[in-house]
Amino acid sequence: MSPRIAVELSPSMLRCVVASGWRNAARRTVDVPWSPDSPEAGIGALRSMVGGVESIAVAVGLGLLRVARVELPPADDDARAGMLALESERFFATRAPVVTALSAGGNVAVAVDAVALERWCSALEQWGPIVAIDATPMALARALGRDGQGTYHVEANTDEHGVVSIRDGVVIAARRIPLAVDERPGVAPPDRDGVPGTHLAAWGALLAADESPGSALASAERRRRLAARRRRRLGVAVVAALAGLSLAVTAADRWREGTWRALEVDVATRRDSAAAGEAALAAHARLDAEVAVLARAAGSGGAAPRGATLGALAAISNALPPDVVILQARAVGREWQLEGTAASAAALVPHLDRNGHFEDVRMLSASSRFRDGPRTRETFSIALRVRPGA
């Protein structure tokens, strides 16, 4: 983005502040000699040193201004500025057309030759659009802020002292004093916001670009153009903000959709991983239900006593290897049928047959092999008879 600049037009120098294109942060200062009677040469030299710019703010130096203290009827600043422009001949001793401005909330009025100002602005507009025009006393007060207090010396003509007095951020006096006065009145403006005091008036003009052009040192026609340009800048800023908000909402919606899909995939993966565990829990619940049925049958005079059934179940559990998972067990008297999974189904028949609690151990159906995560498992269906007293 191209930088913004602010230029103070003094009788002999162009004092320029180069600022960031998107925030009020000064980057550097540039000074170039010029002649108000031939502005094109000095402005061209400044342009070659700075390069392309986004916008230009202008402060007209005290040495190029006529200054008067005026007493106007009580009214708002815009109305008082209108009175000043309407009767400029009354307050400034000249018949030449002038452009006037009034200090906000004060009684200090300034005027500049209208033809000269238009020539300066036209030369600058060959470089970039002008967004603010201010007088050095008012621009200096703006740069110092509401807490600005004191009397400051500023550049005037070569045979003059320039003096600006400020109280609570308002210009209360501005004078051009002949050099016959030995002592230079006031103090130098302080550095502010990274801008040296010698360029503070230019910086104040740049800050005026964010304000209404009603107090600008400009003709009525140029004020209308400044206001229209400001409205366009605000419109572009609003559109950009809305576009940014729309992009943010779209990005958030896409992020939500992506997160939802990722969660669905994660849930499906975890459901598949948990299937074996859920099956085991279901088998365990069925086994508990069957044991409860057998216990009730034994308690109500069934074929096998309750203690014998539970003892046989305990003997079977103790005899089986640790890797065996019983999925179903059925008993009719001393005859038992077991179904489940094991690391090696073929080894279970001889293993149980060697146990003294069981007899007639046999495989009821063929075994099938499957993967359970990293392990290989085999199914089994075994029948056996529990010896009496087991």
Image: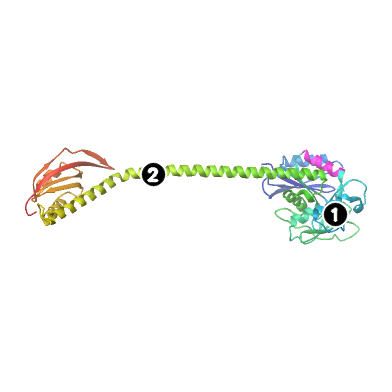
Q: Which residues are magenta?
A: 115-126
Is residue 210 visible in the rendered image? The answer is yes
Q: Quadrant of residue 266?
A: top left
The residue at which mark 2 appears reads as 266
- SS at circle 2: helix
**Residue type at tag 2:** Asp
**Residue type at tag 1:** Ala
Given residues 158 and 156, the one toward you in this image is: 156
* In this rendering, position of residue 360 left or right of residue 137: left
The residue at which mark 1 appears reads as 109
Q: Quadrant of residue 245?
A: top right
Report the residue that reaches farthest toward the front: 300
Given residues 215 and 188, the one toward you in this image is: 215
Task: Choose the circle earlier in sequence order: 2 or 1.
Answer: 1
Question: Few, some or many C-alpha atoms within 10 Å of disc 1 (few <14, some 14-19, many ≥20)?
Answer: many
> Residue 384's x, y, as percent?
10, 46
Q: Residue at x 68, y 43 (%)?
A: 235
